[in-house]
Image: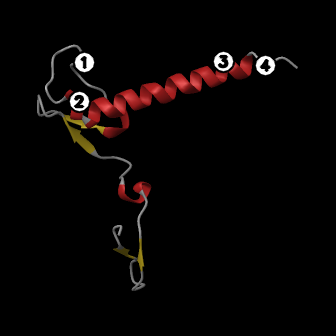
Amino acid sequence: MGILCPLPKSGTFFTPSISDILVDEMELLCEKYKEKVDSENARCAHPVEYCRFRTSCIIHFMEKERDFENKKKTQDIKKNDNVEF
């Protein structure tokens, strides 16, 4: 059974999607340095230093996810540019 949330002023319930749960802007916290990081441009401030939290770090995950999406967009653009008519 999933999470049920009440709809405002309606008395009914719905199961929220992940986009309903996530907030567009949230502050993330670097566990190692206790620094706040904006989620919109989440980047590790110390990527070459050892960090015992890196494997479970949301900042690191979001950075890699964004890099992957940008790489994929670049490859799609290059693929579309090479199409001959």
- Secondary structure under the numbered disc 2 in the rendered image: helix
Name the amino acid type tagged 4.
Val
The residue where tag 1 is placed is: 47
Q: Residues within 10 Å of mark 4 (few under 14, many from 20)?
A: few
- CA gap between label 2 and label 3 equals 32 Å
- Secondary structure under the numbered disc 1 in the rendered image: loop
- CA gap between label 4 and label 3 equals 9 Å
The residue where tag 3 is placed is: 78
Please state the horizontal and vertical placement of residue 21, each as a whole percent of the image: 36, 58
Q: Earlier in the sequence, mark 4 or mark 3?
A: 3
The residue where tag 4 is placed is: 83
Please state the horizontal and vertical placement of residue 57, each as a whole percent of the image: 23, 34
Residue at (36% x, 67% y) in the render:
2
Q: Quadrant of the C terminus?
A: top right
Q: Earlier in the sequence, mark 4 or mark 2?
A: 2
Task: State whether residue 42 appears in this view.
Answer: no
Residue at (73% x, 18% y) in the render:
81
- Placement of 45 over or under 18, stated as above or below: above
- Secondary structure under the numbered disc 3 in the rendered image: helix
- CA gap between label 4 and label 1 equals 38 Å
Foreground: disc 2 or disc 3? 2
- CA gap between label 3 and label 1 equals 29 Å
